[in-house]
Image: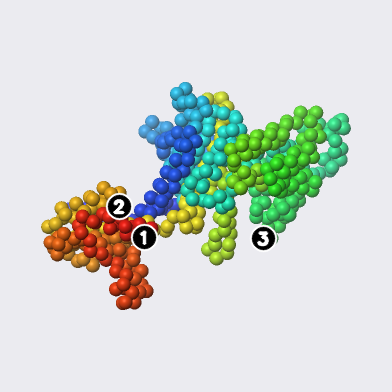
């Protein structure tokens, strides 16, 4: 009889696009999220923890039109043939929760949510298939007070976790203002060049016969502003330009005059919010929007401008000046998704890249107003505004600023010199824990004391407690300052070592007080 084939051992490896998080990483992230949650809670937002699994229908707007709906998400078919998927973000679950429980929830509904999300996308350096999001949203009000509140709350959250004032700025723009600038812009060709500049003089030509520029194409172009600058954007908005490789990129087709107006919009930030708003109002007056008012053009741009003015007024009333929050028309990221105000939190301090070159840290949060959150479920438009903080980027920023260390301080280790005295060692560690000091008893093989000290070193322990037969007989314990001991061993002479002992003998009753004193000195 043939022996059954031995199954190969599984390979111990993390799946591609995923990673493991250890001690300090987990606790520092939890501490940061707890601090942010405290700010959100103070603003009156309630916590929401929704299911990590949603139906594909609930995530539908994020999925491409394919036979098997697993592109972009991790999806599978349940036993009842219903497609399920891991949540792609925290916004789609909010839409489902609000639509499902709207009769039991207050209006407006203010919630925050924190947790992992999953995206079935090609991973790359710093790009993972599982990552954390930290969101806050207000659903059910069109008031600009909600938008202003989100901006203020974001500023407070950044300061709470350790980003000092002056090291960040929350920048605010409005999709409607850009729509007003873009509305009526036409492809520059013979037909449009022959038109009079005043649309009221149009007689036989119908606007529907003309080729208007796709606003999304302009959005994609001006999103390159930071990379190619004003000149590059001008070229891309008009006839096109060659990229660094020499390849020609076709332009959007605007006239130089209209392209210049778009670039002026991007550069219209002034020395104050009032000056910026004045610049935008001048641009709106110079746009083609006013010129063909009688042809039925909307006033969406002016509506957006009024919303920005209201946000600026509300923030100023609460003491949030341009040192924290500014109106900045150059914010374009997310304009394709949001329907009104958009905002982005940017860290302004410099760090060194992998080649040692200084660069600004950049964006760590973004959000805005989106007024079709629940409509997919109920058919009724529900206004909403929210923000999402990039958890990993904010943690990296705090590391760069030295606000959190690269390694967490480990527990005090109570070494074991005599197995028969384990109850005494447990009593010591119990007293330390009752005093709020992180501590543990060494639970490995106590035969080799050197291994116990190596263990304490690997744990990053600040203090070791040592007590053998002599110490128990005398009613004392030895307390070793491992941080000071390492410093002395590294660069001290024998004489300095004698003058600065790193090990102390104290009465057993003084254990907790001496450990607390050493930990305080180390801090």
Q: Is residue 437 left or right of residue 53?
A: left
**The residue positioned farthest toward the bottom in the image shown:** 494
Q: Is residue 27 visible?
A: yes
Query: Mark 3 touching mark 1, by CB under 8 A?
Result: no
Quadrant assignment for the C terminus: bottom left
Q: Is residue 67 left or right of residue 485?
A: right
Looking at the rendered image, the disc whose residue lies closer to the viewer, 3 or 1, is 1
Q: Which residue has dot 2 on it?
A: 438
Q: Is residue 74 left or right of residue 346?
A: left
10 Å neighbourhood of mark 1: few (<14), some, or many (≥20)?
Answer: few
Residue at image point 41% right, 47% down: 31
In x, y percent, where is residue 457? Answer: 30, 63
301 to 3, vertically: above or below:
above
Q: Helix or strand or loop: what does disc 3 sit on?
A: loop
In x, y percent, where is residue 166? Answer: 58, 51
- Specify the label residue 284 is tagged with: none
Q: Helix or strand or loop: what does disc 2 sit on?
A: loop
Q: Is residue 399 left or right of residue 145?
A: left
**The residue positioned farthest toward the top in the image shown:** 103
Residue at image point 21% right, 55% down: 509
Q: Helix or strand or loop: what does disc 1 sit on?
A: helix
In x, y percent, where is residue 395? Answer: 47, 52
Looking at the rendered image, the disc whose residue lies closer to the viewer, 2 or 3, is 2
Looking at the rendered image, the disc whose residue lies closer to the viewer, 2 or 1, is 1
How far is mark 2 from mark 1, CA to CA? 15 Å
Mark 2 or mark 3, earlier in chain? 3
Q: Which residue has dot 3 on it?
A: 244
- Specify the label residue 522 is tagged with: 1
């Amino acid at each position: 009889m043939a022996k059954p084939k031995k199954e190969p051992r599984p390979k111990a490896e993390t799946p591609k696009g995923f990673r493991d998080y250890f001690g300090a990483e987990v606790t520092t992230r939890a501490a940061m999220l707890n601090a942010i949650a405290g700010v959100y809670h103070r603003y009156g937002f309630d916590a929401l923890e929704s299911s990590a699994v949603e139906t594909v229908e609930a995530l539908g707007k994020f999925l491409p039109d394919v036979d098997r709906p697993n592109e972009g998400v991790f999806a599978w078919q349940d036993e009842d043939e219903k497609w399920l998927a891991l949540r792609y973000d925290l916004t789609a679950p909010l839409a489902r929760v609000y639509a499902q429980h709207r009769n039991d929830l207050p209006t407006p509904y203010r919630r925050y949510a924190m947790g992992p999300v999953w995206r079935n996308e090609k991973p790359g350096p710093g790009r993972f298939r599982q990552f954390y999001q930290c969101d806050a949203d207000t659903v059910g009000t069109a008031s600009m007070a909600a938008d202003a509140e989100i901006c203020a709350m974001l500023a407070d959250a950044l300061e709470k976790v350790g980003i000092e004032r002056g090291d960040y700025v929350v920048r605010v723009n409005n999709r409607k203002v850009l729509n007003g600038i873009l509305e009526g812009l036409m492809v520059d060709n013979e037909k449009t060049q022959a038109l009079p500049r005043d649309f009221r003089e149009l007689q036989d030509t119908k606007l529907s016969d003309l080729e208007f520029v796709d606003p999304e194409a302009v959005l994609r172009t001006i999103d390159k502003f930071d990379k190619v600058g004003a000149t590059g954007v001008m070229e891309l908005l008009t006839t096109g330009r060659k990229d660094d490789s020499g390849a020609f990129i076709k332009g959007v087709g605007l006239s130089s005059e209209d392209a210049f107006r778009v670039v002026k919009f991007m550069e219209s930030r002034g020395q104050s919010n009032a000056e910026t708003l004045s610049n935008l109002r001048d641009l709106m007056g110079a746009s083609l929007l006013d010129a063909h008012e009688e042809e039925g053009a909307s006033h969406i741009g002016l509506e957006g401008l009024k919303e920005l003015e209201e946000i600026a007024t509300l923030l100023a009333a609460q003491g949030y000046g341009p040192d924290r929050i500014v109106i900045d028309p150059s914010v374009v990221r997310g304009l394709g998704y949001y329907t009104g105000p958009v905002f982005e939190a940017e860290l302004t301090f410099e760090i060194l890249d992998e080649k040692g070159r200084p660069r600004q840290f950049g964006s760590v949060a973004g959000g805005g107003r989106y007024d079709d959150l629940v409509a997919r479920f109920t058919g009724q438009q529900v206004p909403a505004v929210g923000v999402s903080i990039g958890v990993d980027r904010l943690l990296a920023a705090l590391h760069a600023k030295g606000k959190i260390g690269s390694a967490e301080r480990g527990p005090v280790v109570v070494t074991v010199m005599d197995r028969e005295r384990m109850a005494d060692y447990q009593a010591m560690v119990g007293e330390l824990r009752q005093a709020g000091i992180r501590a543990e008893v060494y639970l490995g093989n106590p035969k080799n004391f050197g291994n116990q000290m190596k263990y304490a070193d690997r744990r990053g322990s600040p203090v070791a407690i040592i007590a053998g037969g002599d110490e128990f007989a005398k009613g004392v314990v030895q307390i070793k300052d491992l941080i000071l001991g390492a410093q002395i061993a590294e660069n001290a002479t024998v004489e300095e070592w004698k003058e600065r002992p790193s090990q102390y003998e104290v009465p057993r009753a003084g254990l907790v007080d001496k450990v607390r004193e050493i930990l305080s000195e180390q801090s």
